[in-house]
Structures are given as C-alpha cells and as structure tokens.
Amino acid sequence: MSSFTRSLTLVLVVVGLLLTFNVSAPGRDCGESQTARKPRGKRAAVKPAPAVRVITADELGPLLKPGKGRPLLVNYWATWCDPCREEFPDLVKIDTDYRTKGLDTIAISLDDLTELKTEVPKFLQSMKVRMPVYLLNVADPEPSIKMVDLAWGGALPATFLYDGRGEIVYKKFGRFDTAELRTAIAKVISEKCGVKSDE
C-alpha cells in the first residue's frame, strides 16, 4: 500500500509539473510574442513614410506660401541624386528639431512618376520622414524652376527658406551647410517671435 501511495504521489507530482509547464509555457510564448512584437510596436510608433502626393506646376505655387505666417523650408530632391540622399538625414533632423518651434518643412521630389511606388517611398521609409512630401509631375520642369527662383537652374538638391511673409531669406543650390541653414532658421524663427511679441 505504501508502494502504491508512493507511486501515486510520484504520478501526481509529475502531472503537476507537466501542468505547471503547460500553463507557464503559453505565458512564456506570449511573453516571447510580446517581446517579438515590441520592435513592431516601436516601428508602429514611428510613423510610416508619408504618402507622397503628386502635384502639378499649378499646385506648386500655393505650396510655397507659408501657412499662418510660419517660416517654410522647402527642399527639392530626387532619389537618383547622391548629394540629395547625403543631406536628407540632416533635413529630417532639422524638421524634427524645429517643427515645434514654428517651422514648416516640405520636400518636393523631382523623381520620375514611375518611382512613386518604388524608390521614393522606400527611401522616405528608411529616412523615417514625417514632413509632407510631394512629387512634381511636369512634362517640362523649366517653368516651375523659374517660378521658384530665377537664379535656380534646376540643379539638385536645392533648398529655400521662406520667412513668414513668403520672402526667400536663404537659398542653397547643391548640398546645404547644416550649421549655416540652422543659423538662418533660428534667425527667421526669432524674427517671427519678435513680430508676435510686438503685436
């Protein structure tokens, strides 16, 4: 009888261990799943690349007017342009740093329309872009280029900073100097704040 009791106790212990393992295993799996999902959650927290809106030459003009008197930074770029790609992380950082301080930033791609669903979104996703992005779809870019600035020949990248009145206060054809651009932005923001405080 004591041998039977011992056997029964042993069986109950083994069954108890198995139940404990089976109960905790899903917990571990859930924990592992949650851990595995955490990076996805982090990626979800970082907004996906913005949808790129295709615009015509007629739609470009209104985009270059600052909204509510806020300074506006506009960068013209393309995925095939190496200097554009090199400076883009700095552009994204500037947008992140100054958005809450009163600066609007937009990027206008001069890529071919065929790149709209391939290279352009792929590049923007890799850069973690949050600013609005547009693709200028024109047969002849020359009139649009001249509308932006008569001195601009269309070389990329090109960057323009507009003050709250819509006047160009900084422009750079080719890769911008980050420190120089930040200085210009800080100045135009402080001027805007100065105007506000005078009112």
Image: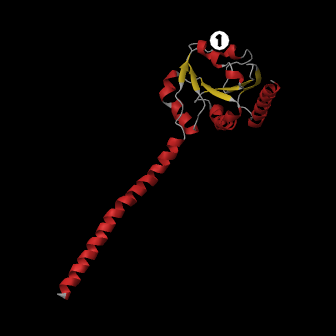
Q: Secondary structure at mark 1?
A: helix
Q: Quadrant of the N terminus?
A: bottom left
Residue at 57% x, 15% y: name it.
56
Q: Could you say which quadrant of the image residue 55 lies in?
A: top right
Residue 117, above or below 97: above
Residue 4, above or below 57: below
In the image, residue 189 lies at what x, y percent? 76, 30
In the image, residue 146 lies at what x, y percent? 69, 13
User: Which of 106 and 178 lies nearest the eye of the viewer?
Assistant: 106
User: Which of 98 and 107 lies nearest the eye of the viewer?
Assistant: 98
In the image, residue 169 lies at what x, y percent? 78, 23
Q: Which residue is mark 1?
A: 143
User: Which of 47 and 121 lies nearest the eye of the viewer?
Assistant: 47
Query: Seen in the image, is 12 located left or right of residue 112?
Result: left
Neighbour tally class for label 1: few under 14, some 14-19, many 20 plus, Cα within 10 Å: few
Query: Seen in the image, is 94 located left or right of residue 43?
Result: right
Q: Could you say which quadrant of the image residue 149 lies in?
A: top right
The disc labelled 1 sits on which kind of residue?
Pro
Residue 109, above or below 2: above
Q: Quadrant of the C terminus?
A: top right
In the image, residue 183 lies at what x, y percent? 79, 34
Residue at 33% x, 67% y: name it.
21
Query: Seen in the image, is 116 located left or right of residue 91?
Result: left
User: Which of 43 and 138 lies nearest the eye of the viewer?
Assistant: 43
Residue 186, above or below 147: below
